[in-house]
Amino acid sequence: MRVIRVGTRKSQLARIQTDTVVAMLKTWHPGMQFEIIAMSTTGDKILDTALSKIGEKSLFTKELEYALEKNEVDLVVHSLKDVPTILPPGFTIGAICKRENPCDAVVFHPKFIGKTLETLPEKSAVGTSSLRRVAQLQRKFPHLEFRSIRGNLNTRLRKLDEQQEFSAIILAVAGLQRMGWQNRVGQILHPEECMYAVGQGALAVEVRAKDQDILDLVSVLHDPETVLRCIAERAFLRHLEGGCSVPVAVHTVMSDGQLYLTGGVWSLDGSDGMQETMQATIQIPVQHEDGPEDDPQRVGITARNIPRGAQLAAENLGISLASLLLNKGAKNILDVARQLNDVH
């Protein structure tokens, strides 16, 4: 019996996410054996620097990809939001699982339970390592002070609860739910308050692009709606040439054959910014189109079981929205944000 080796980061959340994916694969492939191999990544090791300052796009993926390249593992599980929009040659995202709630949540210090960001006292410190969140929230809640906080979820919650530095911290809803900490969610930030990161809430399975057996094995996990939303989001980010060193955020909705994509860019302090919404018609027919299968990747994603026309429409939507913002001056906002981020 073949043993499939699965790479993951060592954090508790990463292990839970990987266990979830392996459990789904076992349901589809009951005869398979799986071995989980955990390793530390650059992003796990550098904890005293804001993510946006490290200047490396593949902070949480590079070591896992190296193991994949060396054939030490057969597939790796990531949070999709950690996966760069351009993958190294030879790799592809072979599956994107059904997305959980992509929004951000506020977790409050015990003494502020029952509050919201709006009702926190003047000059309360709110912890987040995300430029995207700071840019959007500083504008809406000027009475608060946003400060960087690093570490895995356990570390951040401990810093919040045991030290007096932070009144609240911002975390992804999906991560809190996967850890079983829903009871700590004090406030959910809806997209009109704070749009989310590209791919947030979705798990991705990365494989060697030419490893057909493994691609076939994992492709059953693809969730069509999640894949199409994330193709649009990733195409938007890639066309903007964004990463974690600039504030870029999105919101997608699929309804009645229409994919709606809202995307925004901001200056670091949120004082300057722009957002727009576009839509595209995306029918997901039951039948596949006929024709040769050239298996193109779309923003690093291989999804043979989802019609090519739908994938192309989603990708073009992301590119069109990015082009619209760039034509309206987004490039200048992003260039200034990059320069300031490098200086500070």
Image (cartoon, helix red, strand yellow):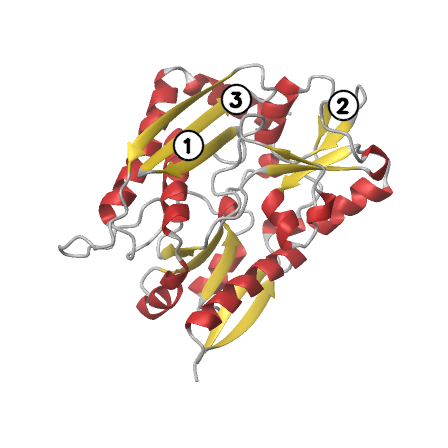
Return the residue at label 3. Answer: 266
Mark 3: which amino acid? Trp
Which disc number belongs to residue 330? none
Of labels 3 and 2, earlier in sequence is 2
In what element is the residue under mark 1?
Answer: loop
Return the residue at label 1. Answer: 241
Mark 2: which amino acid? Thr
Circle 2 Cα neighbour tier, 10 Å, few/some/many (<14 / 14–19 / ≥20): few
Is residue 265 depicted above or below 300 in this figure? Answer: above
Mark 1: which amino acid? Glu
Q: Nearer the viewer, mark 3 or mark 2?
A: 2
Marks 3 and 2 in Cβ contact (< 8 Å): no
- Say whether residue 277 is visible: yes
Tell me the CA gap for discs 3 and 2.
24 Å
Residue 291, position as x, y percentages in the image: 13, 55
Return the residue at label 2. Answer: 119
